[in-house]
Amino acid sequence: MCLIFLAINSHESFSWELNALSDLGIILGKTMYFFNFGLIIGGILCLFFASGLYLVFENNKLGRISSFFFILACFFLIAIGLFPENVRPIHYTVSVGFFLFLPVSLFLIFFSFYFDGKISLALFTVLIAVIVAIPWILYFSTDFFKAVAIPEIISGLAASIWIIILGLKMIFDPIKIAR
């Protein structure tokens, strides 16, 4: 996420009301590199997190399936960086894939935690899933957001917070999260 913010700050004419974040991926120079490499690196790091999540759901079939959906979202995130906005229609397809599989995987992970009796993790995950999904519902059903950049950043930040907090729990309290 830091490289995405560097890309935003490196492009003076970026507008939250007019642009998509992906517009940054085709601006020649450091903006393009910050954005595209940020997505690729972020997606790879998410894959490492997802592999740990898969292990957390060792004995939970729904958890394994939900982890797989999250892994697909990670691959789509990497693909957004590999196929910038000017690589059409691939960029559009992988962007839609990411922003579709991300909330779906989070809702499935919520049910996985819930049915495993991990209520606090389930509630935290469903809260994040709602925060990830609502901007897209508003974007497609109203004119609340004029450009796609705001739903993109809200979804990305919420998912990043979830990954960081859950990742820290997996590192520092792995027995409690695995129970």
Image (cartoon, helix red, strand yellow):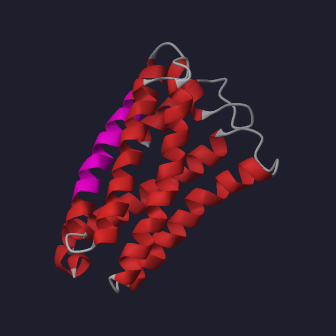
Residue plotted at (45% across, 70% down): 125
State the residue in front, 98 or 65: 65
Quadrant (top left/top right/bottom left/bottom right) for the C terminus: bottom left
- Residue 68: x and y in percent read 33, 55
- Residue 18 figure quarter: top right
Estimate the x, y position of residue 134 in percent, counting from the top left: 65, 59
Vertical position of residue 15 compared to residue 175: above or below: above
Q: Is residue 83 magenta?
A: no
Q: Is residue 51 visible?
A: yes
Q: Position of residue 41 (x, y in %)?
A: 32, 36
Q: Which residue occupies the foreground of this view, 115 or 120?
A: 115
Q: Main secondary structure of the magenta part?
A: helix
Question: Which residue is at 69% across, 55% downward?
Answer: 137
- Looking at the image, is 175 positioned above or below residue 33? below
Q: Please indicate whether residue 56 sits to the left or right of residue 14 in the image.
A: left
- Which of the 4 image quadrants contains residue 57? bottom left
Taking the image as drawn, is residue 9 in sight? no
Toward the left, the furthest residue is: 175
Q: Is residue 54 left or right of residue 3?
A: left
Residue at image point 46% right, 32% down: 80
Image coordinates for residue 171, horizontal then vertical, percent: 20, 66
Residues in magenta? 37-51
Question: Residue 40 magenta-drawn?
Answer: yes
Q: Residue at x 35, y 86 (%)?
A: 117
* Image quadrant where one finds the N terminus: top left
